[in-house]
Amino acid sequence: MTASLLSGKPLAKLIQQKAQTEAKALAEEGSCPTLAVVVATEDSSTHWYVRSIERAAENAGIGCRVIDVGQDATEQVLISVLKDLSAEPSVNGIILQTPLPPGVKTQELVQYIAPEKDIDGANPLSLGLLAVGERAFAPATARAVVEMLDHFEIPVAGRNVVVVGRSTVVGKPLSLLLLGKDATTTVCHSKSGPLGKYTKDADIVVVAAGRTGLLTGTDVSEHSVVIDVGTNVLSDGSLAGDVDEASVRPVAAALTPVPGGVGSVTTALLLLHTSEAAREQSRAARTPVLTP
């Protein structure tokens, strides 16, 4: 038996088309959805990713502004940039790209992204809203996992789902999204002990720990659907996931590839979130403010 490969590319294309349709409708109303990406690093993989966002945005008819403040930018400079973008009416979505300069902490900055423009769910307020079931933009990678499961008609309700990794970018928000879909969810982390203890009996395993080859064939069973969120850059510049594909694929029922899996859906969702944010902001601008 060999696991079926769950490619994200067809789903990413569908999501991009949806974003494009919304962007076209807004353009006909006189506005262009615009995404701002703030960069403060010379990291080559980061710049490659940002260029891929620019290309995807252009294809979808969405504006994309890259604000490169340089690798020596201070926290105050970044705060000022985020405040200005949050107040700028022509900007509908904001992403603060990592890594950041040494000593600058992401959590100190993301609170300055206006919640209505927080299209990658970075502001702690967005995570709080997700936790109580209120409307907020989930981090695009976390939502991409759920969209992949829906697209391939993989049942979630009542299923045993194990999420490996507890970051605020993927693990924590994803666990909230899965709970909202009635999954029985377990979150594993560096102190959980041997992964197989939890993942062997899981119906769905999502690996988002940032460690190459963390999940192996001995950690899964023949009914496991494995979603690999890892994007680790190897010494030769290629990408590898958190799953040891060579040992997992002969065992599991299904597996997402890296690259070509969750990552492509994530980028498409950032564009969809931007167009959705633009629509909401357009409605809010047209709604009269009632005063007593």
Image: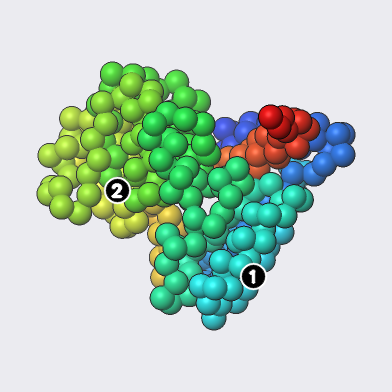
Residue 3 appears in view: no
Vertical placement of 288 versus 173: above or below? above
- Give the colouring mode of the picture: rainbow
Whole-Å distance between the Cαs marked 1 and 2? 30 Å
Vertical placement of 134 versus 240: above or below? above
SS under mark 2: loop
Report whether 95 appears left or right of 129: right
Labels 1, 2: front one: 1
Name the foreground residue: 251 vs 130: 130
**Residue type pointed to by label 1:** Asp
Name the foreground residue: 250 vs 173: 173
Q: Name the quadrant containing residue 23.
A: top right
Residue occupied by mark 2: 165
Tell how many labels. Answer: 2
Residue at image coords 47%, 67%: 99
SS under mark 1: strand
Name the foreground residue: 81 vs 251: 81
Residue 200 appears in view: yes
Quarter containing the N terminus: top left
Q: Which mark is residue 68?
A: 1
